[in-house]
Amino acid sequence: MSIRKIVVNLIPGPLIRVFASPYVAGDSLEKALAAADRLHARGLDITLDVLGEAETTEAKVRSAVEVYYRALAALGDRPFCTLSIKPGHFGYYVSPDFCKANIEGFVAACQAAGRGLTIDMEDTDLTDWTLELYRELKPRYPILGTVLQARLYRTEKDVDSLAGLGAQIRNCIGIYNVPATLAMTRKRDMKENLLKMTRKLVAGGHYVAVATHDIEYIRKARAILEELGVPKSRCEFQMLLGVPRDAIQKELVDAGYTVRVYLPFAEDWRDSIAYLRRRMIESPSMVFLVLKNIFKRNG
Ligand SMILES: Cc1cc2nc3c(=O)[nH]c(=O)nc-3n(C[C@H](O)[C@H](O)[C@H](O)COP(=O)(O)OP(=O)(O)OC[C@H]3O[C@@H](n4cnc5c(N)ncnc54)[C@H](O)[C@@H]3O)c2cc1C
């Protein structure tokens, strides 16, 4: 276990909750919608995510899915909001068939409402399953998007497997720690591959959402989109709530790009705390930000 993981796991949950709250939109749907409206006032679009992963009981999955249906209904006339879901949250670890039925039911409801929906990409045990489901559902449900992780060696072939679908792809480096046999280990290599996949997705006629906070690579991706003449209606940039990127977001919005903020919320704070711990383990700068907040409050 890495030192960072040990340190992060030692921080008590209540402290994480108090000091890392910028990364979660709150503990109710109403608070999440209010945060979405505030961000939209700055020209930003939103994808709303109900926190929680890898549920192992039917009851927990059903209550998670129910929150999503409530969120879908509550979004009302906010065309700038889409939704993001995770197969683990929709019951994959109860049973893949149960999960598939839950996802397809929700995808159909989103399609009927004209609401965009992205199936997030989780760990590599789910990559094949998620992409198979995506290829099956996308032709019937045009609102549907999914995610590819540029750190994986397989991703180039996965783009090939989407040929002809006109897919909507969030192109990110991936958050999960994957063995070196399956994935690149150096961030720079992952990000160079993110650019390569941006080109490949555009060439394949897909809608591409470039999801990174690395300003150098945001600019490089933008230069590629402009070089390839991609219309602004065929691409966007995405970032996570709480990562301080106001200036680049404004720059992109002013240039006419859609910038979408991934806005997580959970009605149960334990789900938020688990999410925040995972982000802190992934990002040293976030550990630093949280610790700085702790010292600021106490000092
Ligand atoms: C909208 C969105 C959706 C995503 N969906 C998925 C998904 O479905 N599956 C998946 O595997 N991954 C997903 N990710 C995570 C993604 O794959 C990366 O792990 C994450 O974005 C960090 O990589 P980076 O490209 O920003 O580069 P990094 O090098 O990690 O970050 C660049 C810089 O941004 C800052 N930064 C980054 N993250 C944080 C943070 N949390 N707090 C403070 N500062 C930070 C740091 O200053 C860092 O130096 C998503 C990311 C985004 C933005």
Image: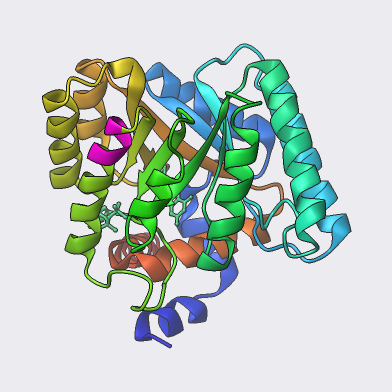
Vertical order, 48 against 115 (above or below): below
* Image mark count: 0
| Residue 92 image point, x, y percent | 72, 59
Furthest residue in direction top, as rendered: 77
Residue occupying the point 43% across, 36% down = 163
Viewport quadrant of the C terminus? bottom left
From the viewer's perspective, is 58 left or right of 17?
right
Snapshot quadrant of residue 27: top right
* Residue 49 visible to an observer of this rendering: no
Instruction: Tell me if residue 298 is in the magenta stretch.
Output: no
Residue occupying the far right of the picture? 59
Comparing 133 with 256, the one in front is 133
User: Image quadrant for the N terminus?
Assistant: bottom left
**202 falls in the magenta region:** yes
Q: How far across and down, in percent of the image, does residue 106 sit?
A: 74, 34
Q: Residue at x 66, y 52 (%)?
A: 87
Q: Is residue 283 visible?
A: yes
Image height of 298 relative to 222, above or below: below
Q: In the rendered image, which quarter is residue 166 located in? A: top left
Which sits in the foreground, 115 or 189? 189
Tell me which segment is drawn in magenta.
199-203
- Residue drawn at (46%, 49%) of the image: 23
Predominant secondary structure in magenta? helix
Residue 96 location, x and y as percent? 75, 58
